[in-house]
Image (cartoon, helix red, strand yellow):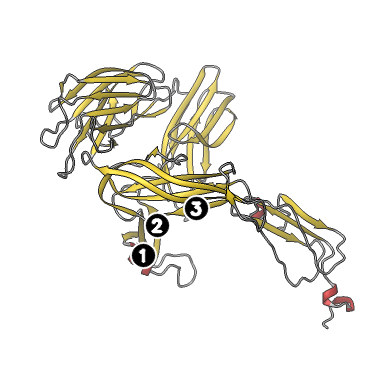
Amino acid sequence: MEEGSQGQLLKDQYPRHYIVSASRNEGEFLRQSTANDFDIIVGSNSNHSQRIADVRFDTEFLRFIRLRFPVIGFIAEVKFFGEGFVPETRWVSQLFDMGEPVNFGRLHYDFEVYRSSGFGLEPELDPNADVRVEIELRSGRDDSPQIHHIVTEIGTETVVTEAVYNRAPSTYVGSGSGIAIPGQQGSIQDDVENWSFWSAPHITSGEEIGSPDGRQFVQVQVFITSDEVFAYGRLNALSIEFSPLLANPVVGEVALLTEPQPDDGVVEVPLGEPVNLTYDVRADFTSDSQVGFNAIRLLTPEAVEFQRFEMGEPLATVELDSFVVNDGALVVYFPSNPVLPATNAPLRLTFGTRVFNFTTEFAGEVFQIDGENLSQSIEGGDATPLVSTNDLRVIAPLDKLKVLSALDLESQVMTPNGDGMHDELQLSYTLHGVAAAGVEAGVYDLAGRLVRRLVSESRSEGRYIETWDGQIQGRQVPPGTYLVRVTVETDLGTFEKTRTIAIAY
């Protein structure tokens, strides 16, 4: 037998001291050069006296395991054993081709939850097990949700098909200087022009699909999450309601009645004060299957006062057949003056309301009264040359004085792909005339929910720069539009500025 140091057999020079640590989540320990223990100690022995160490601990979800020997010794092999079911499962479907642009209805699915009493025991149906499913959808105009690039002769990138991209070399060649070689693979980005972002998660079967209508292709991704080691979920079936378009497209834009063409195209309204808004809608028809509509449902976060309905070119007041104002919606019915392929006319709603959020989207949809087809969502766009906003959103800035000024973003598009280009958001702002003011800077979704707090502390006058890496607790945020908000609390009141940022991968 081989002998080790000090004349001992190698088999007898096993480690006398070991520590087994684990973690479920990524942490700083992955970037540290020293071998520190992870946050959970699952086993240790400082006076080990056998050649084989058998470390057992309660079954739990773990991702990282580290075996550390404070005293050096020889080991032959290490084995780790697990049991149960994975805590997270993600499935992304192929693209579904509807044959033509369609309207989407509800999402239905059959999801079952199973639980086992322990390792090796047959799982049984148990709806009370702590397992949940979230389903997201996105819709697109073409059959490629991503844009592929290769490197050109001058070092820039050009768009190519996926097939051409896959044939291109995928790694740098040459001296290893990191210089891109012409013809090799470049970046892959989400096609945000032709594809929507992933929808908000659907957590109940039968919910209305939140992806934009008027798209031919749809893709589904499913997340199944379990908080129990011996429980899992199974998605048996999934179906999507759809029907032909009522028109193609239906676009709308909102504006202040007194300021239809703001200089920067952004509708700014005073927070909490009465305002009169116009809502222009235009429809086009591209197929005999598109039958038009005779009603509009406008989703309104706050109470509204209906004022006027107009149609035609030029716009002229038209008497509605009826309208309904209730919590969260204004619905107008005009079957006597329907929008049809043969009698197509632009239309305008004028209404009064108040805005209490710093960003509000006035989503809407058109539909047929007692019609067989599904309703169709209104897309933000150029509905009339009389208005220049091309959007359904309004913003209510809280600026009162120039205490907070010059909130600037280095770029309004962020692509945190790790390629060194627009990987971080950098925002800068200036405080004037304050010795100590409470400053809050954060990133929010379009519903006003906090996504990431960047700073929360007292600051004096001066210029400040904050950065964000596009992550939440080590995970990348979903692509989409977000709001960057800086709030300053002073004795004179609250001062605030908001900007939008688009994130794509």
Element type at mark 2? strand
Position of 349 relative to 9 (above/below): above
At label 3, the amino acid type is Arg
Position of 436 relative to 376 (above/below): above
Q: CA distance from mark 3 to mark 2?
A: 21 Å
- To which residue does mark 3 refer? 90
| Circle nearer the N terminus (3, 1) | 3
* Quarter occupied by residue 159: bottom left
Q: Quadrant of the N terminus?
A: bottom right
Q: Residue at x 86, y 63 (%)?
A: 48
Verify CB contact (< 8 Å) between mark 2 and mark 1: yes
Q: Residue at x 46, y 49 (%)?
A: 222
* Quarter occupied by residue 287: top left
In this rendering, the label closer to the viewer, 3 or 1: 3
At label 1, the amino acid type is Tyr
Across and down, in percent, residue 325 comes to: 32, 19
Verify CB contact (< 8 Å) between mark 3 and mark 2: no
Across and down, in percent, residue 372 comes to: 24, 37
- To which residue does mark 1 refer? 165
Q: Residue at x 70, y 54 (%)?
A: 22
In this rendering, the label closer to the viewer, 3 or 2: 3
Nearer-the-camera pick, 415 or 80: 80
Q: Is residue 109 left or right of residue 348?
A: right
Residue 153 appears in the picture as rendered:
no
Across and down, in percent, residue 186 comes to: 39, 61
Element type at mark 3? strand
Nearer-the-camera pick, 238 or 275: 238
Q: CA distance from mark 2 to mark 1?
A: 9 Å
Of the numbered discs in the image, which one, if any, rests on residue 188? 2
Q: Residues within 10 Å of mark 2 (few under 14, many from 20)?
A: some
Q: Is residue 50 left or right of residue 288?
A: right
